Image (cartoon, rainbow, N blue to C red):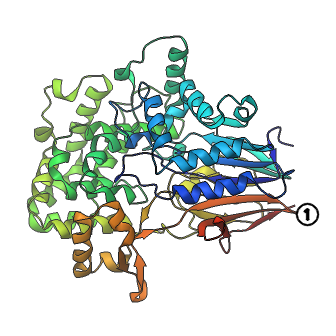
Amino acid sequence: MLNAARYDELYVISDLHIGGKPGFQIMNRGRRLASFIHQLAIRPDSARRVGLVINGDVVDTLAEEFDGYIAVRDAERILSRLYDDDAFAPVWSALAAFVRQPRRRLVFTIGNHDIELALPAVQYSIRRQLAGDDEIAGGRIEFAVDGTGYACSVGALRIFCTHGNEVDAWNVNDHESLLRVVREQNAGMPFNATAWTPNAGTRLVRDVMNRVKRRRPWIDLLKPEKNVVLGVLLTLDPGVVRALPALVPVAWRRGIGELQRRGLLSAGQGAPQMVTEETAAWRDAVGPQLQRLIDDREPSLAMASAGRAEGGVDAMLLDVERQIASGIPIAESGNDLEGTLGWRGMLLDRLQSVDRVDALRRALLDWHADDHSFDLTDQDESYRRILGQVGPDVDVIVTGHTHLERAIVSGRHAYYNTGTWARIMRLPDVLLKDPSQFAQVYRLLDRAGLADLDEATVTGAGGQAMSLVADVTTALQISVHADSVIARLGHVVDDASDGARFEGVAGSEFRGV
């Protein structure tokens, strides 16, 4: 039997993304979440042991204002602001009520947008906010932030919760470096921001996406995150991307992350000899639909693109990668990116001359190619990779990260992804394939704030109107019953009498003895 916490009832949620200033907050269901947590705190059967796991990305420091890529110096200030923000204050109050009830336990696992949870000062701040001077309530708060996930049991079922970013090469956490920061803080040493190397996803968000979303906040709502996100960003603002040579180390760090994910490279070790993984990030950045539009306008660019695979650009990229690996800033290396990476310079020039609306439509078609984002049982890449890292004794595996809910149930075990409590945008294929329909949506996207998008509808399959932004807030419930233990995914919806209620999703139930 697993020597870990045991519950009669366990709830798992993830990807709250508490963060950002008003107008840029992708989490807009704070009151619904607060009502749900209050209900868990005051369950009718007070003798039952109830656990709540927030499985990564509880806060989103990447959406906050600070210098650099990890908010070591600013984390406590950021948290203080988030405690008092009207959009999020009800959630913190509900969590405080939860941990003050007997036989309750609150667990935070670490994600890729809240790596500061590993810092002792952050953990102390959250404990202080939720429990005050009540040491018993404070003892009901647990932080599983070393990258090993959280294991527990409900009845006879063994449960394993992990955020899921550890199998995403863009967003692998460097826990060795995090531990070093913690050790240095405990020893009273100053934080050296220049020595911190962010993963590729963090760099993309901080250096590029945060700048783009100042005008187009909807870019934050697109899921899943794929390599072709770069193609979408290129169509939205070629000038911004041209001005950010940091995108070269983004591609390089993505390749490093792939090796770290596979366990072939230790943290902090460079890989200047590896070309194929990181250059693939550039080749995949512009998908076939967008590339076809560019090639139609400039045949010579098509020839240059075809020539990329012959080794010339690989060799030039390798030069840049070696400079990055050796710590030489690009700006000081004498390496002219526009000259060295000429095909990219031509690409950006061409993107400035093609029809912007059609370019974005094609880039989004590439994004959605073979897309099964909203297929509950799709055995996506995260599922396949996580499953390969979990032993046969685990009955229920729970992830988040992708913002896409999943319930894949077999006779032996169940895999769940608890989706998100943040906004997520749905762009049906029928809309993307119709230039006239997409032109109407583009006019909305070009000027709309997040609140405007909440009210927008588009035409889906069969000509039916559907909301552009999905209002789907997901939770997993695992509960001991008289003769079995039942796990089921559900949606938390508004309820006039109780504030919120949990509605099970058909086909998601897993039953164990």
SS category of the residue bearing label 1: loop
Residue assigned mark 1: 482
What residue appears at the point 39 percent right and 33 percent down from the top-left corner?
198
Q: Position of residue 475 (x, y in %)?
A: 63, 59
Circle 1 residues within 10 Å: few <14, some 14–19, many ≥20? few
Q: Position of residue 255 (x, y in %)?
A: 39, 40
Q: Position of residue 352 (x, y in %)?
A: 10, 58
* Relative to 451, 13 lies left or right: right
Looking at the figure, which quarter contains the N terminus?
top right
Q: Height in image: 374 above or below 8?
A: below
Q: Height in image: 166 above or below 387?
A: above
Looking at the figure, which quarter contains the C terminus?
bottom right
Q: Nearer the viewer, residue 412 or 426?
A: 426
* Relative to 172, 398 lies left or right: right
What residue appears at the point 50 percent right and 48 percent down from the top-left corner?
88
* Relative to 264, 254 lies left or right: left
Q: Position of residue 324 (x, y in %)?
A: 29, 28
Say which quarter of the image contains residue 432: bottom left
Q: Nearer the viewer, residue 153 or 477?
A: 477
Asked whether residue 420 appears in the rendered view, the answer is no
Say which quarter of the image contains residue 362: bottom left
Q: Amino acid at mark 1?
A: Ala
* Relative to 4, 440 lies left or right: left
What residue appears at the point 12 percent right and 41 percent down from the top-left corner?
338
